[in-house]
């Protein structure tokens, strides 16, 4: 006697999506730009901040794939940090120039 040992077949129902397809997220790009902003390029930090803000709004509205939300948030935060660090560095540089100019003027 031969026994039939087939496992039961599982069926998976696929739910049709209603509405337009979601735009793909740019989390990797935003994160890379944010890191570049901190490391070397002030402009990349600004771009990461803007892209991150826009993408997070689109994810909240349901028009962009939300699976990259964490990377997008991290990239936006890195962009903000890079902009703040650059502004602080610029203020310190300006203060040093003013102090140096005043010291040179007083020594004459």
Image (cartoon, rainbow, N blue to C red):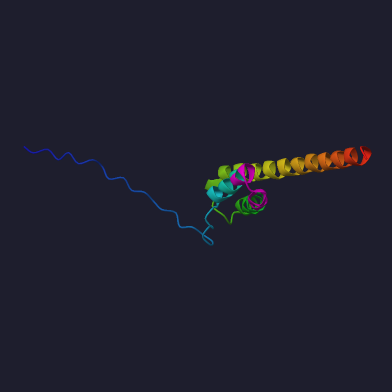
Q: What is the magenta segment's predominant secondary structure?
A: helix
Q: Position of residue 58 (x, y in %)?
A: 62, 54
User: Toward the viewer: 35 or 41?
Assistant: 41
Q: Which residues are magenta?
A: 36-48
Residue extending farthest front: 108
Q: Would residue 100 be found to the left or right of residue 87 on screen?
A: right
Q: Would residue 59 be found to the left or right of residue 94 on screen?
A: left
> Residue at 82% across / 42% down in the picture?
97
Q: Position of residue 91 (x, y in %)?
A: 80, 42
Residue extending farthest bottom: 20
Magenta stretch holds residue 37 = yes
In the rendered image, the quadrant that contains the N terminus is top left
- Can residue 79 be seen here? The reply is yes
Say above or below: 17 vs 11: below
Magenta stretch holds residue 25 = no
Q: For the image shown, how many numbered marks are present on the structure?
A: 0
Q: Quadrant of residue 61?
A: bottom right
User: Toward the viewer: 13 or 58?
Assistant: 58
Q: Position of residue 24 (x, y in %)?
A: 52, 55
> Residue at 52% across / 47% down in the picture?
67
> Residue at 54% across / 47% down in the picture?
68
- Can residue 66 be seen here? The reply is no
Q: Quadrant of residue 84?
A: top right
Q: Position of residue 46 (x, y in %)?
A: 68, 51
User: Toward the viewer: 36 or 27?
Assistant: 36
In the rendered image, the quadrant that contains the C terminus is top right
User: Toward the viewer: 68 or 37?
Assistant: 37
């Amino acid at each position: 006697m031969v026994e039939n040992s087939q496992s039961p077949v599982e069926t998976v129902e696929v739910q049709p999506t209603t509405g337009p397809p979601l735009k793909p997220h740019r989390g990797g790009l935003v994160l890379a730009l944010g890191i570049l902003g901190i490391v070397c390029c002030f402009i990349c930090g600004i771009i990461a901040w803007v892209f991150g803000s826009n993408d997070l709004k689109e994810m909240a509205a349901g028009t962009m794939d939300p699976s990259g939300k964490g990377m997008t948030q991290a990239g936006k935060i890195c962009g903000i940090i890079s902009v703040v660090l650059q502004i602080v560095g610029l203020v310190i540089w300006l203060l040093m120039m003013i102090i140096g100019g005043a010291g040179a003027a007083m020594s004459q």
